[in-house]
Amino acid sequence: MAATVSGSLDINELPISRRELTKISFENIIEAISPELSKIFELVSVEVIQCPNLTQPPFYLAAEGLSGNETAMQFGGLPYVMPFGKKEKLYDMKDIMKITGFDPLFVVGAGAGPWPYANICSEFIGNLRMTSNNSVNNRSHIYTIDPKNDQLVHEELPQNETRFSHMAHFFTSNGFRGEVLKIVCEKRIDSVDFVTSIRLALKKYFGNETVVLGGVILIENGKVKVHVCPDYSKTPLDSEKKLKDWLKIYDLPTPLVCLGYVASHDAGLDMMPLQHFHVFSDHGSGGHYMNDVEPATIKYTAYFNIAKNFIRVDQPEAPFSFENF
């Protein structure tokens, strides 16, 4: 498959599938998740508000809002990560404008970082706004591990480094300010994490309908458990135990900003995993969100919009399963 000058795959040669999702109102979402979240958290509030300006602290996003042509996208998948990372699977966020036609385009989400830039495997936080006149505001981040001491290394990517590797889950829009769903949950009283609790609530209410919520979560008042991938494994990651042994786990201080999306059900496009969020911060902490570790004090504030469409790019030939290795 041909690559571009930047080394990324030619978007015109990649398979792309599109699904129009069932129209869901904010009121439907509130009815679905409010009672279920109240089983997981002591304090719960879910309401529709005008989106705050997300370019401002503590969010530091590349566009002000989450509205306009709201669409969820998935590139690649777990079979491009395991048992060995497929380094030829290199993509470019700029190509999302070609796929969607959105102008302006705002992209937020979680994936694997551009390995040619970092020369190592990394956790990627996509955060980019661009227009058709090639105006780009790239506020994306990567987190790697220093092999000498296992310490986290944080870097905000240069403006011209818009690539990512292997897989990513993005929520895209025009980045306009408009109505969003604000979810506030405090004091976790169950073992289920915040994102999973939303996914399970959506699944319970909507069944086999695919509902996708995407945007930003502010996490405060406690520590958060994340994983970060070290350098590419020299032995095959062909079992769940080997994967867990490979990943590095950290408990991070808040505040943290978390980007990604959560889907209730696979629309027949190998959407696994159905939830994917990565965290970043202005104090150097970040990685792949797993759960909080101080439930008595933790606070989540999410600003989400509802995807109207889903786009699947470069779907693996077979769904991920350790049994396939």
Image (cartoon, helix red, strand yellow):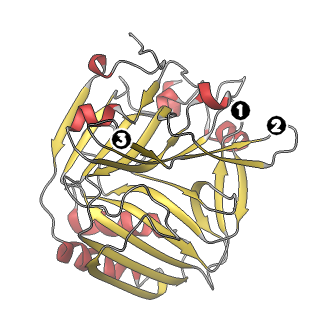
User: Dividing the image into 4 quarters, which one contains the N terminus?
Assistant: top left
The reply to whether discs 1 and 2 touch (Cβ–Cβ < 8 Å) is yes
Query: Marks 1 and 2, Cα distance to the nearest angstrom?
Result: 8 Å
Q: Which residue was labeled with disc 3?
A: 135
N-term-proximal mark, 1 vs 2: 2
The secondary element bearing badge 2 is classed as loop
Q: Which residue was labeled with disc 1?
A: 231
Amino acid type at mark 3: Ser
The secondary element bearing badge 3 is classed as loop
Query: Marks 3 and 1, Cα distance to the nearest angstrom?
Result: 33 Å
The reply to whether discs 2 and 3 touch (Cβ–Cβ < 8 Å) is no
Amino acid type at mark 2: Pro
Picture coordinates of residue 36, whole percent (x, y): 36, 78
Q: Is residue 260 visible to us here?
A: yes
Res 22 quadrant in image: bottom left
Q: Which residue was labeled with disc 2?
A: 147
